[in-house]
Image: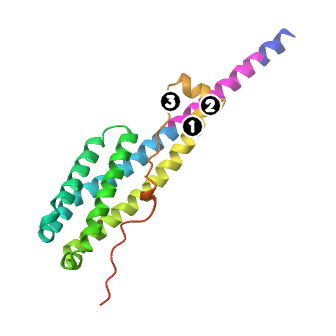
């Protein structure tokens, strides 16, 4: 009888240990996947940041008296780059501000037909549109990975293991309500 109780206790401890190992390894994999997904977003954000000075220089030649709009774009870009190493919440807010300021440049182009027809501007607009599309796809993937990870860290019984091992929730990369609509579609010209 004592042997049976001992083996039962050893079996229960073994099963609990296996469960803890499985949950811990799942949390590590999901955390690493979230970090990798965030890295993908950062690559596309950096690409967008690199395109902005060229865009501003191109617009500057056509819209000299629109310097306040251009200064806002550069200031928003600089803030987004400064926040790049910070918390996801701050970074997300800075990127949303940059997106709004980019919209103002593209809206500005409507007032300047020569700018709108400039091949360099059209190419930059396409490149920024491509970067924006990739940012959105990466953002959706990142948020889905974060959702899985956060759910696991908040649900019982894995919440206990996540708390003991100091796993922390990730912030979602959110967009402002205005930004949820497509805004960077290149202008189609009829020839």
Residue 100 in percent (x, y) is at 33, 57
Q: In this view, which residue lies farthest toward the bottom?
A: 191
Q: Mark 2 touching mark 1, by CB under 8 A?
A: yes
Asked which quadrant contains residue 104, the reply is bottom left
Element at label 3 = loop
- Closer to the N terminus: mark 3 or mark 2? 2
Residue holding disc 3? 167
- Closer to the N terminus: mark 2 or mark 1? 1
Element at label 1 = helix
Residue 31 in percent (x, y) is at 48, 38
Residue 156 in percent (x, y) is at 66, 30
Q: How is the image coloured?
A: rainbow
The structure residue drawn at horizontal position 33% and vertical position 73%, both measured from the top left corner, is: 186
Nearest to the observer: residue 58 or residue 142: 58
| Residue 179 located left or right of residue 51 | right
Q: In this view, which residue lies farthest toward the top?
A: 2
Q: In this view, which residue lies farthest toward the right?
A: 1
| Residue 4 located left or right of residue 113 | right
Q: Is residue 155 magenta?
A: no
- Closer to the N terminus: mark 1 or mark 3? 1
The structure residue drawn at horizontal position 83% and vertical position 15%, both measured from the top left corner, is: 4
Asked which quadrant contains residue 184, the reply is bottom left
Element at label 2 = helix
Quadrant of the image containing the C terminus? bottom left
The structure residue drawn at horizontal position 28% and vertical position 47%, both measured from the top left corner, is: 80
Disc number at residue 26? Answer: 1
Residue holding disc 2? 158
Q: Which residues are magenta?
A: 9-28
Quadrant of the image containing the N terminus? top right
| Residue 19 located left or right of residue 106 | right
Gap in angstroms between the C-alphas marked 3 and 2: 11 Å
Q: Is residue 20 magenta?
A: yes
């Amino acid at each position: 009888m004592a042997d049976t109780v001992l083996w039962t206790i050893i079996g229960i401890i073994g099963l609990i240990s296996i469960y803890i190992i499985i949950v811990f390894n799942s949390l590590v994999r999901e955390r690493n996947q979230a970090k990798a997904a965030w890295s993908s977003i950062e690559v596309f954000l950096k690409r967008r940041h690199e395109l902005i000075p060229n865009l501003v220089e191109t617009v500057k030649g056509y819209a000299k008296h629109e310097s306040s709009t251009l200064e806002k774009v550069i200031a928003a870009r600089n803030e987004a780059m400064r926040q790049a190493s910070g918390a996801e919440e701050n970074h997300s807010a800075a990127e949303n501000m940059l997106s709004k300021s980019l919209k103002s440049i593209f809206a500005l182009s409507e007032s300047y037909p020569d700018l709108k027809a400039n091949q360099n501007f059209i190419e930059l607009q396409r490149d920024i549109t491509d970067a924006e599309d990739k940012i959105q796809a990466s953002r959706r993937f990142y948020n889905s990975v974060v959702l899985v990870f956060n759910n696991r860290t908040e649900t019982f019984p894995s919440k206990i293991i996540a708390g003991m091992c100091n796993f922390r929730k990730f912030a979602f990369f959110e967009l402002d309500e205005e930004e949820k609509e497509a805004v960077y579609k290149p202008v189609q010209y009829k020839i």
